[in-house]
Amino acid sequence: MIRDILHVGNPLLREVSREVDPGELASPAMQQLIDDLVDTMHAANGAGIAAPQVGELVRIATIEVNHNPRYPYKPPIPLTVVVNPVIEVLDDELVEINEGCLSVPDMRGNVMRHVNIRVRYLDRDGNEHDEVKRGLTAGTFQHELDHLDGLLFLDKVFDTRTLTTWEQFERFHRAAFIERITEFVTRVGS
Ligand code: ZN
């Protein structure tokens, strides 16, 4: 079921979400929530969505990139359900990424993200994963997992002059960003 997406200003987006215990994860309600997140992410062409964005304060997010029309330069990420994720930053390399968010309508801006991270999480069946993510894919994970701590990309925009509507991004900034980020993706491989 496609759910309504909360927008910036809704206090629920600023809450710290709680962990899900493995028994609860198997419940029909939690499995339905995961299905709803996937449906809602797909309907909105999101690269990811986190449970608080539909008003559920649990540490669950879904991520998928597959020729995404909002972010055509992002390398593909298979559908991934992350439960109780923990990120460990592996080194101090950073990349400046232009981001948007389903909860921040018609706005994009530049944030610094870690290039190399390790993420540990449970999938929807409760299996443990321990994976290294790099590049734009690492950035997507950081963006979605920030939602679980009540953070939005807006909080991390270090130069507010990079804020644009989507239309003005297309008009004035897209070409330069795509050139820079394509070079980065070619170098990093993800
Ligand atoms: Zn977001």
Image (cartoon, rainbow, N blue to C red):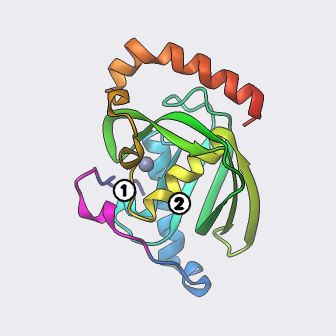
Give percent across and percent down for residue 33. 47, 67
| Image point (60%, 67%), residue name | 85
Among all residues in the image, which is located at the extreme front? 92
| Image point (38%, 62%), residue name | 150
Q: Nearer the viewer, residue 91 or 44?
A: 91
Of marks 2 and 1, the one in the foreground: 2
Q: Which mark is residue 3?
A: 1
Q: Which residues are magenta?
A: 7-17
Badge 2, how many Cα within 10 Å: few under 14, some, many 20+?
A: many
Give percent across and percent down for residue 16. 39, 70
Residue type for callout 2: Ala
Residue type for callout 1: Arg
Residue that numbered label 2 is attached to:
61
Q: Are marks 2 and 1 in contact (CB under 8 Å)?
A: no
Quadrant into which the N terminus falls: bottom left
User: Does residue 168 show up magenta in the picture?
Assistant: no
Q: Specify whether 46 is left or right of 184.
A: left
Badge 1, how many Cα within 10 Å: few under 14, some, many 20+?
A: some
Query: Is label 2 in a helix, a strand or a loop?
Result: strand
Note whether 34 is above or below 27 in the view shown: above
Give percent across and percent down for residue 74. 62, 33
Q: Which mark is residue 145?
A: none
**Residue 24: which quarter of the image?**
bottom right
Of mark 2 and mark 1, the one earlier in the sequence is 1
Among all residues in the image, which is located at the extreme bottom? 23
Give percent across and percent down for residue 147. 44, 58
Q: Is residue 38 visible?
A: no
Note whether 73 is above or below 172 in the view shown: below
